[in-house]
Amino acid sequence: MPEQPGIDAYAAYLPSYALDDTRLDPTAPARAGGPTRSVAGYDEDAVTMAVEALRHIAADTPAGRHLLLATTSAPYETKTSAGVVHEALGLDPGVTALDLRGHRAGASALDLVLRGVATAALADVRTTRPGAPDELAQGDAATAFAGGGRAAVLLARAGHTTELLDRWRLPGERHDRVWDERFTAEILVAAGLDTARRALAQASLDAVDEVVVSSSNPRAAAALRKALGGTGQDATVERATGFTGVAHPGLLLAAALDEAEPGQTILLLSATEGADAFVLRVGDGVRAARGGPTVRAQLAARQRLGYGRYLRWRGLLDVQGPARPASPAPAAPPMHRRAGWKYRLEGSRCDACGRVTTPPGRVCASCGTAGSGSAPVSLRDRTARVVSVTRDHLTTMPEPEVAIVVADVDGGGRLSAYATDVAPADVAVGMAMNPVFRRLWTTDSIHNYFWKLRPAPADAAPGKDTADGQ
């Protein structure tokens, strides 16, 4: 455990898409000035987003520490989803992988990180019924935190538990049920103010430099920000992403740390099914502690998404697909035997010629040497260059077509993979792409995860309008 509890490293992940218009009829008047929600791609879920956030900070997670996945949208009901994250990151088997469930799980995971016993990902995919009043007020995101003190030191914490029927979902249901927010707001505000004041008193502070408020109830969040003297920077982020569920307190904290200066103090208050308050002092190493791009940079790089396309991705619009059989379900034995390739994207480097074979095999694909020693080599953090592109118009994915590319990996190895987060027509020979962990498809209740290729930042087209999916 670190001498000073706090945050040693952090990262935020926002998907590449944003939805700001829920009109099914494009001739209807456009709504001006409304909120925008962050939208996970059709091949993303809580597991893949957690992997994307943790890739920046979790490589050195020591044995004996816990890896936590906090979410309300786990892809499996009883299977431990954090185990898939653990495998994709290639962590030591001595790191215990655990799921945390429930709307308060984000604050609970942060608490365990700040105590120095865990590395955690907070990830959620939020879905409402089409036309719900808060459809654009919900969003998808992931954040990751590792314990230590480089980014921020914990000065005080306080908690308040309240049994409250606010948001809930029965087993087998897809969408949250919500009680009238006017009733729950008053209770959450009272709990939040009491908790924040106790945390500030414990830290011997009358005020802080930045107030960050996350709440499942927007009325409560607005009232708490006003009562605690918040600047509203957290509200600006929330208006651009929606409430991202379990990930939200981490997302708003990451955005605050992106802008904070060493020595400043931050009050993080999460008011959901009670309240949790954390008082932090920003560390001297806050800039070096951030993994990946800032929240602001990710917001600026998103693509606009059409409502019809969003509904297809979420399975909320039943559209006839191509006349072809469903993709086969993966089987447990080969998934276990080939875990290095499937989850960690490991090839094998031949001891005889030094070339990399992908998928890994007993015979070198370059020199044909059989039975020689070979060492696993991970390709997941390397850049690949497209050498061939094919466009599949008969895909079973919720898209009219997808691009399949063959790409040479820097340092050796060749990949054949689906392209993602890019229009198939925009994929070109020579394009630089990076591997990303995604869900290929789901068959017989088995999620088939593997790696796809996404344009590297230099070759991506930030802000491109993809609203033509109406």
Image (cartoon, rainbow, N blue to C red):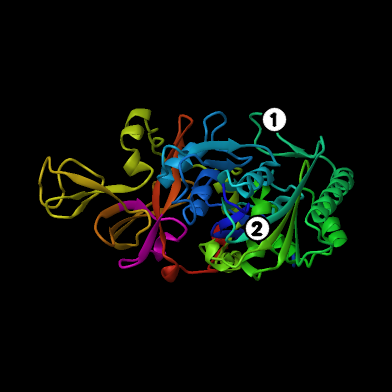
Q: Residue 168, located in which quarter of the rendered image? A: top right
Asked if the magenta segment contains residue 105, the reply would be no
Q: Residue 390 at what x, y percent from top left?
A: 32, 56
Q: Residue at x 71, y 39 (%)?
A: 176
| Residue bounds of the magenta highlight | 416-435
Q: Residue 196 at what x, y percent from top left?
A: 81, 53
Q: Is residue 329 above or below residue 247?
A: above
Q: Which residue is mark 2?
A: 153
Q: Residue at x 57, y 51 (%)?
A: 2
- Please identify the quadrant where the C terminus is shown: bottom right
Report, in whole angstroms, how far the alpha carbon at label 2 lies from the one at label 1.
38 Å
Q: Foreground: 311 or 276?
A: 276
Q: For this view, does 419 lie left or right of residue 5?
A: left
Q: For this view, does 356 lie left or right of residue 299?
A: left
Q: Residue at x 53, y 52 (%)?
A: 41
Q: Residue 316 at what x, y percent from top left?
A: 61, 43
Mark 1 element type: loop
Q: For this view, does 244 lie left or right of residue 164?
A: left
Q: Foreground: 123 or 40?
A: 123
Mark 2 element type: strand
Q: Is residue 142 above or below residue 205?
A: above
Q: Residue at x 65, y 58 (%)?
A: 153
Q: Residue 64 at what x, y percent from top left?
A: 49, 39
Q: For this view, does 105 lie left or right of residue 220?
A: left
Q: Which residue is mark 1?
A: 170
